[in-house]
Image: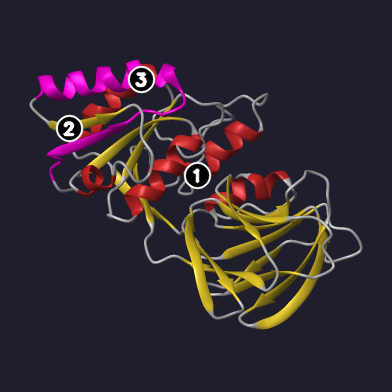
């Protein structure tokens, strides 16, 4: 691994409890003579220049902090190391703020590897010709009603061919990373993070296609609200409402050019154990005697 010379530290801007941890990390980095920068209050536009000059960024919080950091760092090919101070912490690497010093030591010794995760790009189009805006998603793109529980009707197209019309509370278009988030909660399958597939999952479908669909790598999805909708339809990207859809608008969703990179300290087969430990907390996490295939 390339020697790390400059580290960025991002606390969660709306979680003040992460700020002391961020300052402690910056203090230790200064003591060790490692160039660094620190933000406790920030947005994805305000840190762009500093991120571009970092070798790695340490993000403190939960999965929300990782999504924020992952999106902004992906544009500059900078990996993120997550310190969990959230609830689940699917994306973070260091389990507790009490463990960050040992994690930092391992990082600085070069004992880590880089995991790449696919992202989506959602482009809002007018009249199928004019691009209005585009947004990158690490988890998912969701088309839904602006009011919870209001059903929407959505035409879906796969590789420019009509697929089906959904009558549902929402349609989730997810990355493999997002397959363990909103998509999982609505009955979708779990996809390992190294895949490059797109997942489509309807939420509470009524008299329409109810099964999730896993699309092949490189697929293009177009989503178009029908004229039958009586309520406002909105576009949400990684949990943020980014647009209210008007007539003759649609969303084109493809894999994004940048990939999000995470620095991992655990073994490369960490994913399934980490997932099952969170989904089955009542089961003995040490499990039975470890078996190897050469026994």
Q: In the displayed structure, would residue 12 be above or below residue 55?
A: above
Is residue 17 one of those drawn in magenta?
A: yes
User: What label does residue 19 carry, if any?
Assistant: 3
Q: How many C-alpha atoms fall within 10 Å of the one at disc 1: few (<14), some, or many (≥20)?
A: some
- Which comes sooner in the sequence, label 1 or label 3? 3
Q: In the displayed structure, would residue 250 be above or below residue 32?
A: below
- Nearest the eye: 104 or 130: 130
Going by the image, does 78 lie left or right of 241? left
Residue at which label 1 appears: 271
Q: Quadrant of residue 97?
A: top left
Q: Residue furthest right?
A: 207
Is residue 70 one of those drawn in magenta?
A: no
Residue at which label 2 appears: 36
Residue stretch in magenta: 3-32
- Which comes sooner in the sequence, label 1 or label 2? 2
Colouring scheme applied when the structure was drawn: secondary structure
Q: How many marks?
A: 3
Question: In this rendering, which labeled residue sits more in front, label 1 or label 2?
Answer: 2
């Amino acid at each position: 691994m390339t020697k790390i010379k400059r580290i960025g530290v991002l606390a969660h801007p709306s979680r003040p409890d992460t700020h002391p941890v961020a300052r402690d990390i910056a203090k230790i980095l200064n003591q060790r003579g490692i160039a660094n920068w620190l933000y406790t209050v920030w947005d994805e536009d305000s840190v762009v220049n500093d991120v571009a000059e970092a070798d790695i960024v340490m993000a403190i919080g939960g999965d929300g902090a990782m999504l924020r950091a992952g999106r902004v760092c992906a544009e500059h090919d900078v990996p993120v190391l997550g310190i969990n101070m959230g609830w689940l912490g699917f994306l973070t690497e260091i389990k507790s703020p009490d463990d960050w010093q040992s994690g930092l030591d391992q990082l600085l010794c070069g004992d880590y590897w880089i995991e790449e995760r696919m992202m989506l790009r959602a482009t809002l189009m007018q009249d199928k010709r004019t691009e209005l805006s585009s947004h990158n998603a690490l988890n998912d793109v969701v088309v839904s009603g602006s009011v919870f529980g209001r059903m929407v009707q959505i035409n879906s197209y796969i590789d420019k061919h009509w697929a089906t019309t959904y009558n549902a509370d929402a349609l989730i278009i997810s990355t493999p990373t997002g397959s363990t988030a909103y998509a999982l909660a609505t009955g979708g399958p779990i996809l390992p993070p190294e895949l490059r597939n797109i997942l489509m999952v309807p939420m509470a479908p009524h008299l329409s296609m109810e099964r999730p669909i896993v699309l092949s790598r490189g697929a293009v999805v177009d989503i178009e609200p029908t004229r039958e909708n009586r309520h406002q339809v909105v576009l949400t990207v990684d949990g943020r409402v980014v647009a209210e859809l008007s007539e003759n608008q649609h969303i084109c969703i493809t894999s994004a050019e940048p990939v999000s990179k995470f620095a991992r300290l655990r073994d490369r087969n960490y994913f399934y154990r980490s997932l099952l430990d969170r989904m089955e907390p009542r089961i003995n996490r040490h499990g039975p005697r470890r078996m190897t295939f050469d026994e």
